[in-house]
Amino acid sequence: VKKESDGELGVRYLLGRGVPQNDQLAFKYFLSAAKDDDAFAQNEVAYLYAAGKGTEQDFVKAFEYYQKAANHGLASAQYNLGLLYATGKGVVANQEQALHWFKVASDHGFEPAKRALKKYAHNSETAVIQ
């Protein structure tokens, strides 16, 4: 029997697959996998910090983990990093950086980033994402 990775256990607890759903245990396992440089786990840790699920809400830490996952090329993390730059959550608002990360994620084919880029690129001088 193959031992499940911490990332796999995080998914099981987050979604309640074969175990009782438990955000705190999901966070614990994802954090362990994230420390092993697992981009998917880093993205999930960022999401849990941003949502305040399984841990205290902390946009600074969410930004930190989205940045790590984005640097691995994970398009959803790149998009979420753009959102944090756009809204100024966890980082000083920076529309140029927001558009940069939307473009990078869009180049990977991530549809929400393509929509964000269309919506905000034409008006980047005054764009504020709500």
Image (spheres, rainbow, N blue to C red):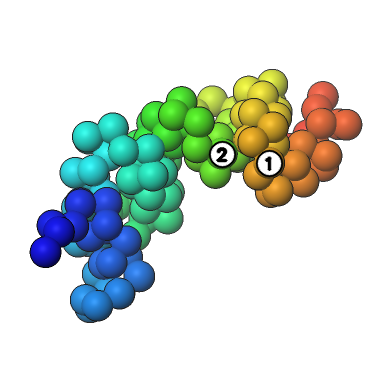
Can residue 107 be seen by looking at this rendering? Answer: yes
> Disc 2 on helix, strand or loop?
helix
Residue ID at (46%, 26%): 71
Q: Image height check: is 107 above or below 52?
A: above
> Disc 1 on helix, strand or loop?
loop
Q: Residues within 10 Å of mark 2 (few under 14, many from 20)?
A: many
Q: Image height check: is 83 above or below 50?
A: above
Sooner in the amino-acid sequence: mark 1 or mark 2: 2
Residue ID at (33%, 45%): 41
Inspect the image, locate mark 1, and give the three-letter code of the amino acid beneath it.
Gly
Q: Residue furthest top?
A: 96
Left or right, residue 35 beside residue 88: left
Q: Image height check: is 64 above or below 49?
A: above
Q: Position of residue 63 (x, y in %)?
A: 44, 34
Left or right, residue 107 beside residue 53: right
Quadrant assignment, res 18:
bottom left
The residue that mark 1 highlights is 109
Can residue 63 be seen by looking at this rendering? Answer: no
Disc 1 versus disc 2: distance between alpha carbons? Answer: 8 Å
Q: Position of residue 33 (x, y in %)?
A: 23, 43
Q: Position of residue 35 (x, y in %)?
A: 22, 35
Q: Which numbered tag is attached to residue 9?
A: none
The residue that mark 2 highlights is 75
Left or right, residue 93 beside residue 37: right
For the N terminus, give its image quadrant: bottom left
Q: Position of residue 125 (x, y in %)?
A: 82, 24
Q: Residues within 10 Å of mark 1 (few under 14, many from 20)?
A: few
Inspect the image, locate mark 2, and give the three-letter code of the amino acid beneath it.
Ala
| Marks 1 and 2 in Cβ contact (< 8 Å) | yes
